[in-house]
Amino acid sequence: MNLGRTFLIAVAFSLIFAISSDDGFAARRAKKKECLECHAEKKPQLKEKFVHKPFSKKECLKCHETHGFTNALKLKKWDAELCFDCHSDKKGEFTKSHVHPAITKGRCWDCHDPHASSNPKLLVKTDSDLCYACHSKEKTEFAKENIHPLVKDGKCLTCHTPHSSENESQLRNTGNGNCTSCHETAKEEFVSAHAGYDAGKINCTDCHNPHSSSHKKLFKESVHVPVSEKKCDACHDAANSKEPLRLKIPGNRLCTICHLDKEKDLGKKHVHAPFSSGPCLDCHTPHASGNKDLLIKKEKDVCLSCHDTEKSQMKLAHTHTPFRDGECSSCHNPHASNEEKLLSDSADKLCFSCHKAEEERLKSSHTHKPFKEGECLSCHNPHASENNYQLIKVGKELCLKCHTVTEEKKKKYTHDPFQIGDCSSCHDSHASDFDGQLKKADGEVCYTCHKKDALSRKYQHTPAKEGKCLGCHKPHSSDERNLLTTSPDNLCYTCHSALVQKFTKKHIHKPVQEKDCLKCHNPHSGDNKFQVKKEGADLCFSCHAGIESQFKKESVHFPVKQGRCSTCHNSHASEEALLLNNPLSKLCSTCHVQDKKFQDAHLNFAVEAADCLGCHNPHASDAKKGLPNEYIHPPYEKKDCKTCHEEENGLAKTALKKDIARVCLSCHTSEKEIFTKDVVHTPFKEGKCPTCHNPHTSKNKSLMKDTGSQLCFNCHKDKLKEFSKGYAHTPVKEGKCIGCHQAHGSGDKALLTNTGAKLCYTCHKDFENRLNKPVLHNPVKKGECLTCHSPHVSDNPGGIRKPETELCLSCHDSSSGPFKSAHATYPVEKAKCVTCHDPHSSDSKGLFRSHLHAPVGEKKCNLCHAPAQGVKPFSLVKPEDELCYSCHGDKVQAFKKGHVHAPVASGGCTTCHAPHASDYKFLLEDTGGMQCCKCHTEAKKKVDAKYVHTPVAKGECTSCHNPHSTDFPNLTMKESIELCNSCHPTQGTFVHPVGEKYIDPRTGSMLTCLSCHNPHGTENEYVLYYKKDRELCIQCHKVE
């Protein structure tokens, strides 16, 4: 009954919820906001006198795209075409010869408000105020003492059209048409003002400024004296003559009658060609000009009309101020000079005439040679450059012109500023009072990036305290981590030489042995004496982490409880095992006096020369007293010494019973059957159990005296030397002898835990899986791994018994007919067999590798190599690249793009591809990333960094790079920003701006993703070159 009611109620609620979901709830969720709900600041514009139709109808999406939560402006089109979608009838107005720049840039909204305005045609301002919004410079120029009435009244459109015109400057009429529409040239006062000459035949703007002027009658700023004095006949025939505008004397001779000083310039060492051979009027106007010195154009335009190279430089990102402002004569004499390039003074003096502050810096104690010798142009382009400060090259490319650091570039670790070419992060490019032209003193320049608070602790390392960073660190690169000047041990011993002798003892602390002082010491400063990173035992626990938990037992040795490891152990080196400060018994007796209490505790045994650690744990124990080791022999625990020791007068003696093995087996009965095995371990066979086992206590299971291989080497000392060879089997390397061998006895030789290959497959499971392939190498088929491999160590890679080819030929007769036939009669006795063959198994006859080069598979070796019977049978018939392209001709064009991989450019296909066979596709020598890292060692270092770019971590280099040729630097698939956005699409929208508009102040080049991020790996989060907080930002955003 209750179940039925519950069911009905559940159904009812479900129906109610479903109905509400379909109606009100869903409707509320589906309702979209109108644009003006968020953009409320636009609402008042709906009340303006003139409102754009789409805006008045709230049809925002006619022009805009939706923008999501970024609130960024997104238009459907970003030029006039957006407006032409509706105003197509106006398009024709913009097709004349001279178009208003606002139109050519496609920005109608520079003049018209796209939403609403109080002015007709939605203009953002009225009359000349609108024009001056862009022509602000002209507004200043038009405010001179004498202003044309139309300009004063803001009537720009009387003379100009707003959109386009067939006439220059968008004038409404040609020639003097605009002027004569107001000024009557036939009037007597007009003729008189022009000295009786017919001014209608002269262009009005040759003498007059149509807007404003400092001179009366709107004369241009620079007026030829005869014109200003109305002495036209000084140059021309009289006004009443037959040809009143004809010159009295043709050519330059007319000019030099007055300008005698210019005639003398012709005798200088360097004469400007237009001055020596061309007419003066090529550069100067004879009447008046808006430009200084009667130039026909602005000085810049006059010069650039001939100097095309410099003209193109005007478009570069960084221009020299005089060059940018067109003041060429600031540096050059326009007519003649005794200096090269027509300079108006010697190069160094010329630069310092403006850069006076830099001239003062010549007094600095360290000056850059080019700066000192006035060779500014060694580094700077005098006109313009794509780089900051008009540098001729970027960063280290410039510096490396003179400063050869080839060797430094090869080093394993590089300083980030050096790596990215930002030399000026540390060095002043001109002069400094600090060594190396550093911007600040040694340490201070480092602290610009590296936080100085590392030195705020109580104990400071002397070099760090004195700011002598370069005493320990290289400034550019090093083969040592942290850019150390030499290996850490050698570096430390440079000052701490007295310690060398102390560290040459028999037993050396691992950090000391590995020459890693920084394991324990902070190199800069610390809160503890000697700058040790932690105090007392806490320092030791940094490495000996497992021991710390062991010290939380029932009873703890007093020095351990106090964290005083150094009471027993030397922190660096000792003649005693375990780095003990003294021989064991002497060390213990320092604290433990052998009084009656001591004797009673040891049952009156003579323990003066005993091994205390045979019974006691030196650190801690679960027992309440006595510190016994974790594993305790039961007779010892019961204080039943007579079970194992000889007896006299009812007391146990120190000596063990002679038949100790029988005593052991009386308890360990299961071990008796070991004697029936084919192979029995000698100590076990001879009843010498204490050889391996401690009869009292041990910290190792089974009361073993030592751990791993160290226990075995106590007897097998001859193996120690053998096992030091280059290639060791992993169990050997890890000291796990019992991984393969039984401890007491075995049915297999050498006490092996299993027979033949079955033992090997215990670990090498992948090889066992390969047994399923149709073709197996005979030793593999028989499970005879040791035919080829040494079980312990070898001088050869892969642990093989002999060098590769020698090993193969010990079974395969290279002189036999079948062998020769299989190798197309080529003498392969000295070749590497595994180049083509898999030594274990294969899917094809002949044990060929997975991917086979076609000529090899077809035994057509002579397609690439000389004949088998030739003098040099393995020499190639053509150069390597020609040989490859003879088949792969389709690749030739694809490999000729702007940037080519070095092996491709040099024709070294086999740098990456195996010429015969491979287990990897495309016949690569190795898997993707590992193949690349063989050459790109710098990138390989980044794989080991703390933070690694995902494609790098996966070895997928070709995710970003084309392995052969591409149109982009570093062989990237795309331009860097576009490439990054292909995986990180949101980054270009929501983070720091990048692209052509944004310049990296360090290099003067475009800011890209790689300005901040390393494409491979770094020690900083998000693969940043610097830490993501202040350190990264101040690389560009400099702060003092």
Image: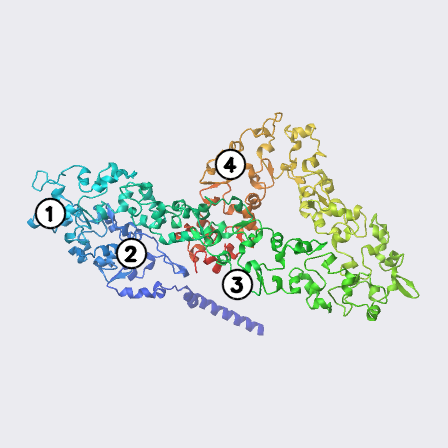
**Foreground label between 4 and 2:** 4
Q: List the residue tagged with mark 3.
A: 453
Mark 3 neighbour class, 10 Å CA radius: few under 14, some 14 to 19, many 20 or more: few
- Mark-to-mark CA distance, 1 and 2: 45 Å
Above or below: residue 197 compared with residue 582: above
Q: Of circles 1 and 2, which is in front?
A: 1
Q: Which corner quadrant holds the N terminus?
A: bottom right
Q: Tell me the amino acid under the disc marked 2.
A: Trp
Give percent across and percent down for residue 991.
44, 57
- What number is the disc on residue 109? 2
Q: Which amino acid does label 3 sit on?
A: Asp
Earlier along the polypeptide chain: callout 1 or callout 2?
2
Which is more N-terminal, label 2 or label 4? 2
x and y percent of residue 852 in the render? 59, 36
Residue drawn at x 41%, y 49% as measured from the top left: 1005
Residues at marks 3 and 2, CA–CA distance in whole angstroms: 53 Å
Q: Nearer the viewer, residue 336 or 32?
A: 336
SS class of the residue under badge 2? helix
> Upstream in the sequence, badge 3 or badge 4?
3
The residue labelled by disc 4 is 906
> Which element is circle 1 on?
loop
How far apart are the alpha carbons under marks 1 and 3?
A: 80 Å
Which one is closest to the eye, mark 3 or mark 4?
3
Q: Which amino acid does label 4 sit on?
A: Ser
- Which residue is nearer to you in this view: 432 or 833? 432
Type of amino acid under label 1: His
Q: Is residue 161 visible?
A: yes
Q: What distance separates the C-alpha of mark 3 from that of mark 4?
A: 51 Å
